[in-house]
Image: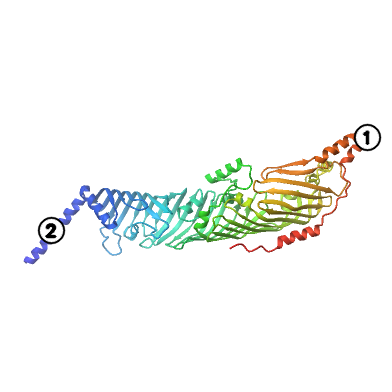
Amino acid sequence: MKAQYWVLTIIAAAALLAAAGLILLTMPRFATPLSAWAIETATGRDTTLDHARLKIFPIGYEMRVLEIQGDIAPYRLGAMDLRFSPLGILPGRALIARASVTDGQAGIRLKGEDRGEGGDFLKNLDEIARAEIENFVFVVSRDGDTQEFTITTASGRPAGDDVEAVGSGAGTTVFFNGRIAGPQVDGLRGALTVRGENFADFADLLGLAAPDTPPYELNGELSAGEDVWRLQGIDGVVGDSDLGGDFEVRLGRDRPLIIADLQSTNLELDDLGIIIGAPSRVSGETNALQEEINSSYAASDRLIPDSTLDLTRIRAVDARVDFRADSVQAGPLPLQALRLDMNLEDGVMRFAPIAFEAEAGNLEAEVVIDASEETPQHDIDGRLSDVRLEQFADGRFAQGGLAGRLDITASGNGFRQAASSANGAVTLYAQDGRIRQLGSEAAGLDLGEVVLLLLTEDPQDPEFTELNCAVARFAVEDGLARAAPVVFDSQDSLIVLDGAVNLDDESLDLTVETDAKDVSWGSLLGDPVIRGTLRNPAIGVDAGETALQAGAAALLGSLTGGLAALPFVELGDGRDADCEALLARAHGAAQTPPEPAAQ
């Protein structure tokens, strides 16, 4: 009996002490330092706690202004309220009926051996039946730089199927509706919407790399684990273009690997301009980078974009991207479809191929950009096959099939730098085509024929002259593209373009020499010249000989008016070009296999 008395006494004393302890914990002056001590003991980090107390009815615990020291940024909770479940001690039941967090902060490290601080911070979420979060900021650290992503609102069962969250950061808003898989945050599963100004900014926030884009919105099914993130069934828009497909990121390697299989039903080519720093004309909203590019281009007298490769992005990830566009809107260019296969590995980006398809003919190129070294190296091999000239300007200026090749190597971090160092050749040729007679006569400054055609030609049914051949080959050396040769041979005249285009400053120095094959009245007997720049060409006349002929005409005109026209008459003794040799050379250049790209 005595033993039972002592047992009951001990139980009663323990209950009394527990009750006293619970009562003391309801008082902030006792609960606050005790809670801070418990957190410091559990985390091993300095802790500051402004207010804490136990609530008896309903059973819960509240803390206000909690700060735990962290390497990236301190953990902070402006307020946290926990409501305990009386049945939480039973197996399979959540201990916390509701957890509410307001104005919080946590640090995340995306790179390095230690990817986070306080790895237990988000574990055992199955012990929470429902969570509500408002204004929780994640400070994301990567290579010493930090950015912020804020969970604006989130609610639901953390380890269940009804989690809804809205967040924002890096100019992006994210909507998620799904579940957190597993009791210890094994991953995310659910519907995801990402909407922002530039997808490159969002990729950078995640520690990845992507090209700049116009404003976008992407919807898909997210499946995210520790080392693999997938966004499948993408349905969205980028700029004025639609986008679909699948996107995957594989982590746990030296560089993340991006695998993407993307399609567009209707691609606006302008939407790709931002990638290379080219101006864009879009019907929807533009972002700050597009506006900056458009403004800079409008103020410039250059045609080649003044943009550079972001080597950090290229070297940050590996990638395999397949992209298809079923329809391409490219303004005056008669493009119908686009196919692009890109492989990025160890800082070397290979496009094999980039293929533009037209209604008749196509342009296919293989491009290698080696950004693994300090100065990027570029290798471009492009082929144009049987593109019908009738597709341009409704066939009002030329008809027939056009073929050719672009074979260029260059170096430099920027497009202008690469252009100024370019070496190789550009070859275009056409056979059995037709050229508008008005243009042919104008090239020879045959004013008599031009005036006659302007007076008699039906604009809806223009007159054409047959082309024996047309060959345009430019040999490029250290950024200087020299005509080698450029020849248009028609039934009426032989037109030869001589001179060069300086790709360094984009200046033009070209002369058009014409040898007429028919008697022509009204020729100035001078040669047209093309000066100015690629952006603003200026066409003039080399009139050195014309002044003498004008003087002779004036003298003859004083004798008899009819003879005044003689100095401006070409007797039609022009010769044909050796079209067979020119075309054979051009065709051979276009068909020669490319040299293997440097590894």
Q: Which residue: 51% across, 57% down?
A: 315
Lower position in the chain sequence, tag 1 or tag 2: 2
Expressed as whole percent of the image width and height from the top left, the position of residue 440 reads: 80, 47
Q: Say what secondary structure mark 2 lies in.
A: helix
Front in this rendered view, residue 105 or 326: 105
Front in this rendered view, residue 87 or 422: 422
Left-right relation of 381 to 89: right
Residue kind at label 1, given as amino acid type: Thr
Against 409, residue 64 (above or below) is above
Q: CA distance from mark 1 to mark 2?
A: 140 Å
Mark toward the viewer: 1 or 2: 1
Expressed as whole percent of the image width and height from the top left, the position of residue 262 reads: 55, 59
- Check if mark 1's residue and mark 2's residue have beta carbons within 8 Å: no
Visible in this render: residue 462?
A: no
Expressed as whole percent of the image width and height from the top left, the position of residue 9 reads: 10, 61
Left-right relation of 70 to 242: left
Mark 2, Cα crowd under 10 Å, few <14 / some 14-19 / many 20+, is few
Identify the mark at residue 13; answer none if there is no mark.
2
Against 319, residue 416 (above or below) is above
Return the residue found at the far right.
Answer: 559
Name the residue carrying label 1: 560
Q: Quadrant of the C terminus?
A: bottom right
Q: Say what secondary structure mark 1 lies in.
A: loop
Residue kind at label 2, given as amino acid type: Ala
Left-right relation of 256 to 463: left
